[in-house]
Amino acid sequence: DTGVSQNPRHKITKRGQNVTFRCDPISEHNRLYWYRQTLGQGPEFLTYFQNEAQLEKSRLLSDRFSAERPKGSFSTLEIQRTEQGDSAMYLCASSRDGYEQYFGPGTRLTVT
Amino acid sequence: AQKVTQAQTEISVVEKEDVTLDCVYETRDTTYYLFWYKQPPSGELVFLIRRNSFDEQNEISGRYSWNFQKSTSSFNFTITASQVVDSAVYFCALRTQAGTALIFGKGTTLSVSS
């Protein structure tokens, strides 16, 4: 199987700008997750999709964050009006059965 | 509340040494799942193992072995005869049966020198 892919791998943006990240899960994985990882910490859950339905959102997902998964395939994560505190690695994972989650390489966001 | 504690922040060993990474978890659920992931310098989290709460058998895979003890809420990971390529951050994670998200510890950075 081709693994989870994420684009871009790196993004540098100025505070106040909007950014969008894309995740392509492993084909036939109907479950998709977004996590955020800051330096020295483990990943923290942001949101979960089963097919195209967004079934769970963490309290970390402020109203500046929005995620979509149209047609149950790829997913996008958008951050509006970025803040310096948004600087982190954004990780996407997919799963076939909800047990093992397979992670992509991540998108590293730097907000200047 | 669910929680995973990896008390060892950093461990340094010399090649061929054995090393054990500790993981202690907290949950009130009777059914749950424990995981170990490896994050090499490239950044991608690599799945290593899943263990179900109702299966306390220890597991060995090559140089890797895992010791699950419900009595002490621990799920420790041992690397035998460590190699430089084992250098990475290792994360222990927990998922309850009702939950969807993985709850990660803060990770242990393992450095193996030649």
Image (cartoon, coloured by chain):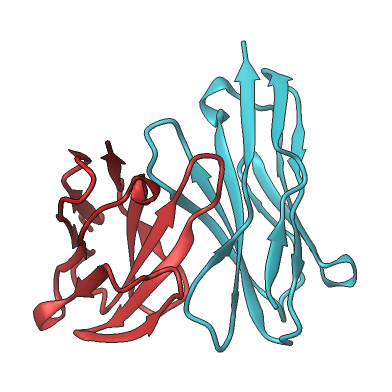
The image shows residue A77 at horizontal and vertical percentages of 22, 64
Q: Which residue is drawn at 23% across and 45% down?
A: A15
Image spot of residue A91 (x, y percent): 34, 55
Q: Which chain is red?
A: A
Q: In this view, does B73 lie to the left or right of A19?
A: right
Camera-nearest residue between A29 and A82: A82
Q: How many marks?
A: 0
Instruction: Give the quarter of the figure containing the N terminus of chain A.
Output: bottom left
Front residue of this view, candidates A86 and B84:
A86
Q: Work out whether B50 lies above or below A85.
A: below
Residue pictured at 58% horizontal, 86% vertical:
B97
Q: Where is residue B57 in the image (x, y as percent from the top left)?
A: 75, 68
Chain colored cyan: B
Q: Where is residue A102 shown, x and y percent of the image?
A: 37, 60
Q: Is residue B29 above or below residue A73?
A: below
Q: Residue furthest top?
A: B114
Relative to B26, residue A3 above or below: above
